[in-house]
Structure formats: structure tokens, C-alpha cells
Amino acid sequence: MDIQYLLMLQNFRNSINDALTPFMEWVSMFAVTYLIMIPVFLYWFWDKRRGLLPLVSYYFCMFFTPIIKLTVCAYRPWIRDSRILPAGDAITTATGYSFPSGHTSTAGPLSFGTAAAVWDCKRFRWAAVLLACFVFLTGFSRNYLGVHTPQDVFVGIFESVLGVIFAWKLFAYLDAHPEKEDVILLGCFILCWAGIAYITLKHYPMDTAADGKLIVDPQKMMNDGYGDIGKVMGFIIARFVEKRWINFKPLKPSVKSAVICAAGLVLMALLKQYVSPVLVGWLGSHWGKLLFSVIYTFYYIALFPIVLKLVGKSEEAAA
């Protein structure tokens, strides 16, 4: 049934000469590249808690998605059935195993989490609805492009909902027991290293094609796992540092504040574009991706907030 659904979408793509393919590729790209900037902007500009809710939901999924992927080791649709021909360059960008959809479990917690964080503000409910719809659009784009089955997407959405619920309940618990946060952070950090050890040492299928080459190289498939778990590690370190020594407050809403935060987002994009390849070149795909993820997450959780704190102090002094 799942393959028939993908073939139906493939026939539709062909009937319209791939007219929608660029848009669907853009949706997929935006979900994993730029969507995170929305809760980061909230974290910097408006309210730390509202920004942290979707981010913590996201880190929940960033830990469990690679663990599930590298445990199930489900092959991509075109490996399962040669009739599936992914659209555009999706076949080159769809790395890793298939189940669950990483794009969906990235868009899900960021969009659902941000929607939940702003829902109590009536003037932003339209944005919350759009963000929630974007999750389903992202999931559909993965089916449309032929790189994921419906069950891959469904589990990605389900995992995202669990991530938001987890973050919501965790925040409620920490409101009542703030002294427990450091213990939880330490426990999660240990869990991250256990996750790295698991995906590194576990057994992987070594099926080969007719030419004798591996259908899927497990070493390549671990790359995303190291990077994703590195994001969780980066958050744990950055959250501890920010809470203990920085403790910034978002700037007062103004055009100037928005411009400063927008500049921070530009630096965030440049960091991903130019620093990641350098670290991967120096340390290899596994440890290079992990270290970059730690640096990248530390930048927006703790490092740029130092700039915001300094700007805030200068504004207070000027006043």
C-alpha cells in the first residue's frame, strides 16, 4: 500500500512535468535548515521560555530519531522497489535510513512547539496554525519526492508530538523543582554518550547489490546520528553555562533589537555553511559533525546571548 501511494504521487509528478518539485524541495530544505531560526529568534528577542519550549522538543527528537533510524535500519523506498524514482536531486540529499522521517521529526517539534508556545497570544494564533500546517506539508513533501513512505512520516509526526509533550511536562516539573535541572542535564549528557556508543558499536545490515557494493554503508549512515546527538550535547553544555554565568534577558522589543537578532541569525547561517565543512575535513564526518553541532548549538543558546546582555546593559546605562 505504501509503495502504491508513492507510485501514485510519482505518476502525478510526471503528469505535471515536475512543476511542484522545486517547491517541495524548498519545503524540505527550509524544514531542516532555516526553520530552527524561528524559535531561536523568539528565545533572543521575545521570551526565553517560549523559545526554549520548541528547542527542547527538538532536542528530544534529535536524540531519539537517530537511535530509532539506526536500530530499525529501514531501507529507502527506491531500494525496496526499483519502480520508485525520487524527484529532482532528492536521492542525493536523502541520507541515512528511512524510518522515521528526519525532516518531519525536525519540522514537527520546532513548528508544533513554537505553535504551542505562542498559542496563548491571540494575535499570533494565525502563525501557530500556519506552523502546525507546515509540519504536515513537510511530511507530504517527503512522500511527494519519493524519499519516505507514509509510515516514516507518521512516526516522525508522532515523535514530534511526544517531544512537545515531554518539553511541556519537563518545564512544569522544573518550575516546581528548579534545583533538579543540573541533575537532569548531567543525566542527559551521560545518556548522549551512551547513544553515541550504541550507534557506533551496534550491528548493522551489510546487504550488497549485484555489483558487490554495500546497499547502505553504515559508517555513512552514522554521520547524521553523531551530528544530531551532538546538538543535544551542545544544548546541555550551553544551557548550563547560560543559566549559571550569563542569564541574559531578551532585549526590549524595538527595531534596533530586531536588527541585532536578525544579524545573529545571519551569523548562525554563515556558521553552518562555512565552519561545518572545515571541522568535517579536520576530524572526519563523525566527530567533525558532532563537534560542529556542539559549537552551533552553543552559539545560539549561550554565545550570542552574551552580545544581547552587553547591548542590554549599554541601553540601561544610556537610559
Image (tube, rainbow, N blue to C red):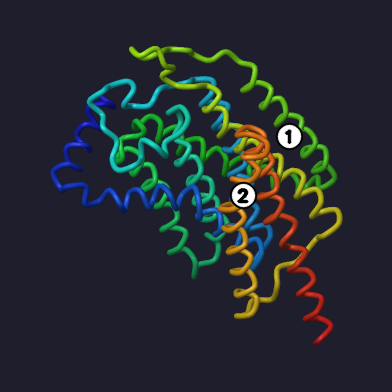
Q: Quadrant of residue 39?
A: bottom right
Q: CA distance from mark 2 to mark 1?
A: 15 Å
Q: Are marks 2 and 1 in contact (CB under 8 Å)?
A: no
Give x and y (percent) for residue 132. 43, 52
Image quarter of the C terminus = bottom right
Q: Is residue 266 left or right of residue 28?
A: right
Q: Is residue 305 above or below residue 138?
A: below
Give x and y (percent) for residue 51. 63, 57
Give x and y (percent) for residue 184. 77, 37
Q: Quadrant of residue 201?
A: top right
Q: Nearer the viewer, residue 73 or 95?
A: 95
Give x and y (percent) for residue 193. 72, 28
Residue at horizontal 76 percent and vertical 30 percent from the top:
190
Secondary structure under the numbered disc 1 in the rendered image: helix
Q: Nearer the viewer, residue 156 or 19?
A: 19
Secondary structure under the numbered disc 2 in the rendered image: helix
Residue at horizontal 59 percent and vertical 52 percent from the top:
272
Q: Is residue 282 above or below residue 122?
A: above
Image quarter of the N terminus = top left
What amino acid is labelled 2 in the image? Leu
Res 29 label? none
Q: Which residue is mark 2?
A: 55
Q: Which residue is mark 1?
A: 188
Residue at horizontal 53 percent and vertical 28 percent from the top:
220
